Amino acid sequence: MTSRSSTAAERILDPAALLADIKRWGADLGFARVGIGNIDLCADEAHFLDWLRAGFNGEMQYMARHGSKRSRPAELLPGTVSCISVRMDYWPAGAAAAAATLADGNIAYVSRYALGRDYHKLLRRRLQTLCDRIGRTVGPFGYRVFADSAPVLEKALARNAGLGWIGKHTNLIDRDAGSYFFLGEIYLNFDLPADAPSSAHCGTCSACLPACPTGAIVAPYRLDARRCISYLTIELKGPIPLEFRRAIGSRIYGCDDCQLVCPWNKFARATAEKDFTVRHGLDHPQLVALFSWSEAEFLEKTRGSAIRRIGYERWLRNVAVALGNAPTSPAILAALGARAHDASALVREHVQWALEQHRFPG
């Protein structure tokens, strides 16, 4: 007679104790919160499919490519029965004040999550370390780690795990820590005691809706990505639509406006993670200086950064728009003029638009 290998679930003698250990190990790895949630996302799937039907994903065709795997974890990873969700704060200590940076038209604004090192690899490594620690306790088990790296409804899973609620701006909010954090997940093939899902606490507040410069939050809990500055400056590969260029202002990579006005962010804390420390002064950089970067400088100064994903051409496109919105000055005009005949048609078109803003203001 052959013996059957025991499953992880059969080897766990005290699930509650293991859960407490997982949360303690997660804290040791720098996660601000760790929770366990169920994987029932039926209502979220309906909301997501409605969002896709409206075309709000724009050019992000990958959002629809995986069918129901995004909202049905067991289809993405067969055997999945529960999910560990984690949160890691990213707001860098000592970064220039966001409001002051946005108020100065000569200064570029970079979303605060992108001022340090790219979070994707860091979170995945920490999640893998957590899985290794679990494995040393329970033996082999089935799992997969995610950090914005696969078709996963991470905010819905985090809500189920008690990490926060999905706000009217569609970001996750924790009542004790605001919304300046990254999320990560571990799909598991065994059950653990689930945390209570978070309840919503936006109430009658709708400050985020009018705060969006381009009107991308078309209704509470409904974001049209095609209008979102993060989409326009990061995801969109071609020309930025004319109707949004003025509203983009000096934002060259992402946008934080809907979070900056959220009253819950008065509880947000600066990250203790050194990898998220500001690099190359990107918390308060002069637009003219950024526009003068060669491609080699761009690649060097964005090494290990999420910013590198947009590439040099789109970087120049974005900075050109911001220069078009900047106060007219000899330095601005000279910087734009120097790239009026750039090798890239995409850059040339945005430079020409920017020059026209200074020739024919208003």
Image: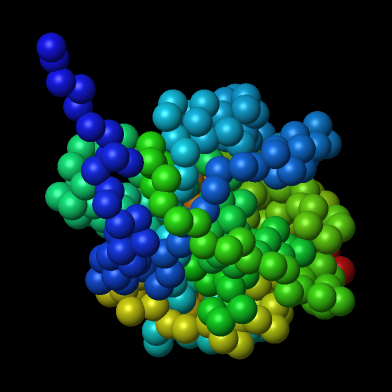
Measuring 13% from the left and 14% from the top, which residue is drawn there? 2
Inspect this view and state whether residue 121 appears.
Answer: no
Q: Is residue 159 above or below residue 66?
A: below
Residue most extreme to the top: 1
Measuring 80% from the left and 37% from the top, which residue is drawn there? 50
**Horizontal side, residue 236 vs residue 246: left or right:** left
Pick the residue in front: 292 or 305: 305
**What percent of the width, then of the height, locates residue 65?**
60, 25
Measuring 32% from the left and 41% from the top, which residue is drawn there? 9
Q: How many marks?
A: 0
Measuring 38% from the left and 37% from the top, which residue is drawn there? 189
Pick the residue in front: 10 or 344: 10
Q: Quadrant of residue 324?
A: bottom right
**Horizontal side, residue 327 vs residue 92: left or right:** right
Q: Is residue 249 above or below residue 346?
A: below
Q: Quadrant of residue 175?
A: bottom right
**What percent of the width, then of the height, locates residue 279?**
33, 71
**Horizontal side, residue 171 vs residue 303: left or right:** right
In the picture, the quarter occupied by the N terminus is: top left
Inspect this view and state whether residue 76 appears.
Answer: yes
**What percent of the width, then of the height, locates residue 76?**
48, 29
In the picture, the quarter occupied by the C terminus is: bottom right
Pick the residue in front: 270 or 108: 270
Pick the residue in front: 261 or 313: 261
**What percent of the width, then of the height, locates residue 237?**
59, 38
